[in-house]
């Protein structure tokens, strides 16, 4: 994750890094970023036999189903080095995930037939259970997000600009609040979310994750 140690803007001058709207050509870069930051903020490639299953859960369905709520950090040369993706209505997104996204990837990633014994099998379980996203305690925060930046681009203020871009887009669509689910072991990410104005939402027995939320109304104050 990132902080606002140095100024960052959403305006992308030629050759200068900046945040812009997602383009279909960014898809492979987003998958790569997702994989290289998925293990509590670290590279997941040493952990998974097929790490491509991770973006199939946490990145690709978002740009497929709601590309208008995807923003990337461009390195100034057209390459995405960070991103934020979101869903405006989590229950509706979960339904679309099952009916529209899952059929596209189920052949490559079939549903598990046993209790998960490996990281890959855990991820398959998440892929085939989009209803897990519907948590009653976060109903007042209908949108949700995922944000990731490559390590070299963290700590430079770009995470704040990505967050501002998504919150403003949601606010302009009339979405009042947003939540996220994060691994409690990812301490730097929690510090970033705290700086972004998120607070913890009480969810019974959340396991190794925490749920955080905030309003979109003050997006321009980030």
Image: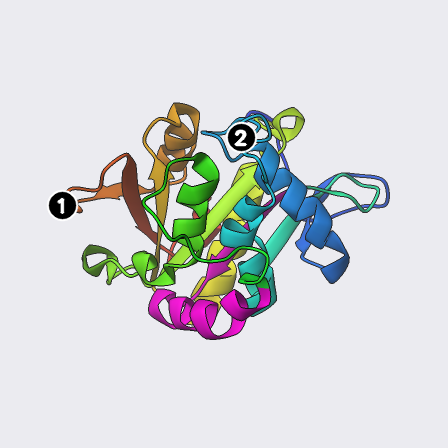
Q: Is residue 97 magenta?
A: yes
> In the drawing, does residue 29 fall left or right of residue 63?
right
User: What's the image's color scheme?
Assistant: rainbow
Find residue 121 and report its horizontal and vertical position in percent: 43, 43
* Residue toward you, 158 or 104: 104
Q: Is residue 19 left or right of residue 162?
A: right
- Give 5 or 50, whichever is nearer the viewer: 50
Depicted 25 relative to depicted 34: above or below: below
In the image, 64 versus 142, the foreground residue is 64
Q: Is residue 37 left or right of residue 171?
A: right
- Tell me which label, 1 or 2, sits earlier in the chain: 2
Task: Indicate the position of residue 49 as horizontal and vertical percent values.
Answer: 57, 35
Q: Is residue 178 visible?
A: yes
Residue at left 33%, top 57%?
133
Q: Is residue 158 visible?
A: no
Question: Farthest front residue?
Answer: 113
Element carrying mark 1:
loop
Residue 190 found in image quarter: top left
Image position, residue 32 (x, y; %):
66, 41
Residue 204: which disc? Answer: 1
Q: Name the residue tied to disc 2.
A: 4
CA–CA distance in space, label 1 to label 2: 33 Å
Specify the segment rendered in magenta: 82-104
Give the number of the disc on residue 46. none
Q: Is residue 147 left or right of residue 156?
A: left
């Amino acid at each position: 994750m990132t902080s606002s140690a140095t100024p960052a803007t959403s305006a992308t001058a030629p050759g200068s890094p900046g945040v812009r709207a997602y383009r279909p050509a960014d898809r492979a870069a987003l998958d790569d970023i997702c994989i290289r930051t998925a293990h509590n903020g670290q590279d997941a490639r040493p952990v998974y036999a097929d790490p491509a299953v991770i973006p199939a859960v946490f990145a690709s369905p978002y740009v497929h189903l709601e590309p208008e709520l995807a923003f990337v950090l461009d390195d100034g040369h057209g390459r995405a080095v960070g991103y934020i993706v979101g869903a405006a209505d989590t229950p509706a997104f979960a339904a679309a995930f099952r009916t529209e996204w899952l059929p596209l990837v189920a052949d490559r990633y079939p549903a598990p037939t046993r209790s998960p014994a490996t990281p890959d099998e855990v991820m398959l379980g998440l892929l085939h259970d989009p209803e897990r996203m519907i948590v009653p305690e976060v109903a007042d925060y209908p949108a949700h997000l995922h944000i990731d930046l490559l390590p070299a681009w963290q700590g430079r203020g770009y995470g704040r600009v990505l967050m501002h871009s998504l919150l403003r887009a949601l606010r302009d669509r009339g979405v009042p609040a947003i939540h996220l689910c994060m691994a409690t072991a990812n301490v730097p990410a929690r510090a970033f979310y705290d700086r972004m104005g998120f607070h913890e939402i009480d969810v019974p027995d959340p396991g190794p994750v925490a749920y955080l939320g905030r309003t979109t109304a003050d997006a321009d104050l980030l």
